[in-house]
Image: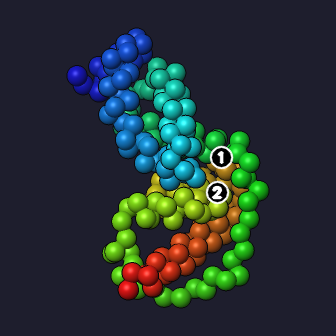
Amino acid sequence: MTERDLIKGCIREDRECQLEVFQRYSGKMLSVCLRYARHRMEAEDILQDAFIKVFDNLEKFQFKGSFEGWIRRIVVNTALKNYQKSSFQKERIGLEDYEDQPMEPVALSNMGEKELLKLIQALPDGYRQVFNLYVIEGYSHKEIADKLSIGESTSRSQLVKARKILKNQIQKLQTILL
């Protein structure tokens, strides 16, 4: 069954088509959710909320561009809305102990995807969101500022701080691995 047929079936509320769409895209979208969430259960909740929105809004998909990209945008927006509702919004972290030192690539080459994901999940919420939106999703600082209702300079600052934290954590891992 083609993607177009699946989408039309979902619009008709065909449960088999809905299941097929979920099975095709839920794995990739869970990976997106995991980058924004603090833990797997939260990511699964975000994924569920996002797919409800996908199915509720399928008639708005105009078959222009990638269907997967359209779903991804809904997932990212759902994750951001989830953050705005969360109680972690006021979280702060001191960066006085983080020094900007050159880093050897050994730690990264010895690091798996799961370890890197854990480091990203451990970032404070604001830093994690800006890092994901800029580095992984490819948004500009202006777009991030608009999405998160922050200033562009705040977006840049949070990205720098997120990178410093990640760099420090990777350096700590590097000393353990070597």
Specify the quadrant that holds the N terminus: top left
Q: Mark 2 points at which residue?
A: 125
Crowding near the residue tagged with mark 1, few <14, some 14–19, many ≥20 C-alpha atoms within 10 Å: some
| In-front residue for pair 172/52 | 172
Residue 96 pos. (x, y %):
71, 82
Residue depicted at 59% across the width and 68% down the height: 162
Residue depicted at 41% across the width and 60% down the height: 114
Residue 93 pos. (x, y %):
71, 69
Residue type (three-letter) at the residue carrying disc 1: Tyr
Q: Earlier in the sequence, mark 1 or mark 2?
A: 1
Above/below status of 40 relative to 68: below
Q: Is residue 167 at all visible to an observer of this figure?
A: no
Residue 31 pos. (x, y %):
43, 48
| In-front residue for pair 52/45 | 45
* The residue positioned farthest toward the left in the image shown: 1
Secondary-structure class at tag 2? helix
**What is the distance, in whole Å, between disc 1 and disc 2 at their CAs?**
8 Å
Secondary-structure class at tag 1? helix
* The residue positioned farthest toward the bottom in the image shown: 101
Residue type (three-letter) at the residue carrying disc 2: Asp
> Which color mode does the image show?
rainbow
Q: Name the residue under label 1.
A: 83
| In-front residue for pair 143/36 | 36
Above/below status of 68 relative to 139: above
